[in-house]
């Protein structure tokens, strides 16, 4: 990056930490630290909910996915508006009226202590691992682009976030999220406009969309009823609906945001705010990735998007063999550009065929380069045991070379004016930090409320509890750094994080469904139903090719059905009314 870009990034980091500390002043009790004194307005909560959900993986990985695969990923969010409406009618009133700190605290009021403990433990396990990947993925990309050590970006991103969250708690999280969402929205609009403005003279949005349509990049809806195909309409509407119900209704990182509302109405409005804005925002991010795809028809793309891999290939590969692949790639790109221009003039089938032939030749050359990189690289470092266990448990194959996440940042640094490039890199930091801050705070909340205050020191006093809460925040920040530093490439970052969630969320949703939807469910039924649900998801993940979005349906259904059966067939006399 140029000095001006570095200056913009440094100013952002210093300013956001200072603002977070200022916004978080005045905490006296854990009610202030974890729930911002239950006095926040709907628009601030809504922006914080959105900021916690949108990570740097969303900003970087989604644009890269649109570049390589098109806009089909949008169906992932089709169930979100419906989920928000259902949550506003069901669990939000229960949580708010119960005056709980955590979503899992409500389960003890409704069922028993062991159901609360197990559910909270599953949250800590799933979210603790996922936040490490959330930190690792953008740090890896930024380390390559900024030409610094991977550990440097991990510690810089996590350290600045920990600094203000440890001090200010949820007030710092929410108010910095408001600022960061403004920066993120500005960055999205900026990149979208830049991708249009930088198209060659004579080519506008109409031509760009025509070319994207020809390549299938604009296809969103796949009506296939298949459970194994990725991102189908029904997978998004049904599987996505269950995932969003689970994430926004049962995940403490989201529940904690709207529990901070000054009234039930404010909490509901914050979710409806996301119901209206989230899908359009994702559409704009994906469309930006598609426009970048069109942009690189008229500007030379790199052979490999990952600059570190490209430099390694240049050092290790036989010069003649690499030069032959590069020459082949450049000729194919020239032919693809000529084919694209011819197709846009005539829209004829012959021109389209010539275009596709050149595009296939480009991809073949790129695949040869990847194969050459694999052949000439030194033996890969052994995979950490914890990473291997997590990957195998989730059914994720050890990924081959994948540089999807480098596409968009490479475009930003290579083709945006100085200063603006630094601003977009700051947007990536903002997206990462807004997610990390909410995760660190919610993990500390669940640890403090669901475990420490129950099993270690129930009445420690305000000063002691505030100190321990800050220490738990620092612990989870350090844990995320440890996971990030040890993580290997698990595949597409955006898919890995959502697969983590899908493995756990459906079963947790099933427990809350038992609590809210039926008066017959008992503590015994909820506890054993949760175990059955986790087992069902594990079996489906291990022995079938069902797409991960459907894990949420499997887990929720298994918990609800088995939990209700156990409650009816083996009552434990812990039946409690809904709170």
Image (cartoon, grey):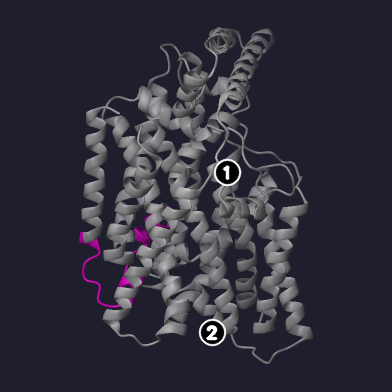
In terms of secondary structure, where does tag 2 sit? helix
Question: Vertical placement of 285 versus 262: above or below?
Answer: above
CA gap, disc 1 and disc 2: 47 Å
Q: Position of residue 120 (x, y in %)?
A: 53, 72
In terms of secondary structure, where does tag 1 sit? loop
Residue located beneath label 2 in the image: 109
Q: Kindly identify which numbered label has been placed on residue 318.
A: none
Question: Vertical placement of 552 versus 519: above or below?
Answer: above
- Bounds of the magenta segment: 22-50
Q: Which residue appears at 59% of the width and 28% of the height?
A: 217
Q: Position of residue 435 (x, y in %)?
A: 41, 53
Q: Nearer the viewer, mark 1 or mark 2?
A: 1
Residues 219 and 506: in front is: 506
Asked if one can make out residue 185 in the rendered structure from this viewpoint, the answer is: no
- The crowd level at tag 2 (other Cα within 10 Å; few <14, some 14-19, many 20+) is some
Q: Kindly identify which numbered label has been placed on residue 382.
A: 1
Q: Earlier in the sequence, mark 1 or mark 2?
A: 2
Asked if one can make out residue 34 in the rendered structure from this viewpoint, the answer is: yes
Residue that lies at the very extreme toward the bottom in this rendered image: 573
- The crowd level at tag 1 (other Cα within 10 Å; few <14, some 14-19, many 20+) is few
Magenta: main secondary structure: helix
Question: Vertical placement of 22 versus 337: above or below?
Answer: below
Q: In the visual, does 19 lie left or right of 329?
A: left
**Rendering quarter of residue 184:** top left
Q: Residue 24: within the magenta?
A: yes
Question: Vertical placement of 394 versus 444: above or below?
Answer: above
Q: Position of residue 560 (x, y in %)?
A: 70, 71
Q: Quadrant of the N terminus?
A: top left
**Rendering quarter of residue 215:** top right
Q: Residue 264: within the magenta?
A: no
Q: Which residue appears at 44% of the width and 54% of the height?
A: 482
């Amino acid at each position: 990056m140029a000095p001006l870009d570095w200056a913009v990034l440094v100013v952002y980091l210093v300013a956001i930490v200072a603002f977070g500390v200022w916004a978080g002043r005045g905490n006296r009790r854990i009610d202030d630290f974890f729930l911002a004194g239950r006095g926040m307005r709907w628009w601030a909560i809504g922006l914080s909910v959105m900021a916690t959900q949108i990570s740097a993986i969303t900003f970087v990985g989604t644009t890269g996915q649109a570049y390589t695969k098109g806009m089909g990923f949008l169906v992932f969010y089709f169930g979100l508006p419906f989920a928000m409406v259902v949550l506003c009618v069901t669990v939000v009133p229960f949580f708010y009226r119960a005056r709980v700190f955590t979503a899992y605290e409500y389960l003890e009021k409704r069922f028993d202590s062991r159901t609360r403990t197990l559910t909270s433990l599953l949250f800590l396990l799933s979210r603790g691992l996922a936040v490490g990947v959330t930190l690792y993925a953008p740090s890896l990309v930024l380390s390559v682009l900024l030409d610094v050590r991977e550990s440097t970006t991990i510690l810089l991103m996590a350290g600045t976030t920990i600094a203000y969250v440890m001090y200010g708690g949820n007030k710092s999280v929410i108010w910095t999220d408001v600022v960061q969402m403004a920066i993120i929205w500005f960055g999205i609009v900026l990149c979208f406009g830049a991708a249009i403005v930088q198209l060659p003279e004579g080519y506008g949005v109409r031509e760009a969309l025509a070319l994207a349509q020809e390549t299938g990049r604009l296809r969103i809806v796949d009506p296939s009823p298949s459970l194994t195909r990725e991102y189908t309409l029904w997978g998004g509407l049904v599987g996505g609906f269950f995932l969003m119900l689970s994430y926004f209704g049962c995940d403490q990182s989201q529940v904690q945001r709207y529990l901070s509302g000054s009234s039930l109405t404010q909490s509901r409005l914050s979710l409806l705010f996301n119901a209206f804005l989230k899908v359009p925002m994702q559409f704009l991010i994906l469309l930006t990735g598609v426009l970048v795809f069109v942009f690189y028809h008229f500007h030379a793309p790199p052979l490999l998007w990952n600059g570190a891999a490209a430099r390694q290939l240049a050092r290790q590969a036989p010069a003649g063999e690499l030069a032959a692949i590069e020459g082949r790639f450049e000729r194919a790109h020239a032919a693809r550009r000529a084919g694209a221009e011819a197709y846009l003039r005539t829209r004829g089938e012959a021109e389209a065929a010539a275009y596709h032939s050149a595009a296939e030749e480009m991809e073949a050359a790129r695949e040869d380069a990847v194969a050459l990189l694999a052949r000439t690289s030194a033996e890969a470092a052994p995979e950490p045991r914890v990473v291997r266990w997590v990957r195998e448990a989730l059914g994720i194959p050890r990924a081959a070379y994948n540089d999807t996440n480098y596409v968009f940042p490479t475009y930003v640094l290579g083709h945006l004016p100085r200063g603006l490039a630094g601003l977009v890199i700051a947007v990536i930091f903002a997206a990462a930090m807004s997610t990390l801050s909410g995760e660190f705070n919610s993990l500390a909340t669940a640890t403090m409320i669901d475990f420490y205050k129950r099993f270690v020191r129930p009445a420690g006093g305000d000063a002691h509890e505030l100190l321990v809460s800050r220490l738990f925040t620092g612990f989870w920040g350090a844990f995320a750094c440890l996971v990030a530093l040890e993580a290997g490439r698990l595949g597409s970052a955006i898919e890995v994080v959502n697969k983590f969630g899908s493995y756990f969320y459906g079963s947790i949703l099933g427990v809350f469904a038992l609590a809210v939807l039926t008066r017959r469910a008992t503590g015994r039924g909820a506890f054993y139903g949760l175990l059955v649900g986790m087992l069902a998801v594990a079996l489906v993940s291990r022995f079938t090719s069902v797409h991960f979005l459907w894990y949420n349906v499997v887990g929720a259904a298994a918990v609800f059905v088995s939990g209700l059966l156990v409650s009816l067939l083996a009552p434990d006399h812990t039946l409690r009314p809904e709170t």
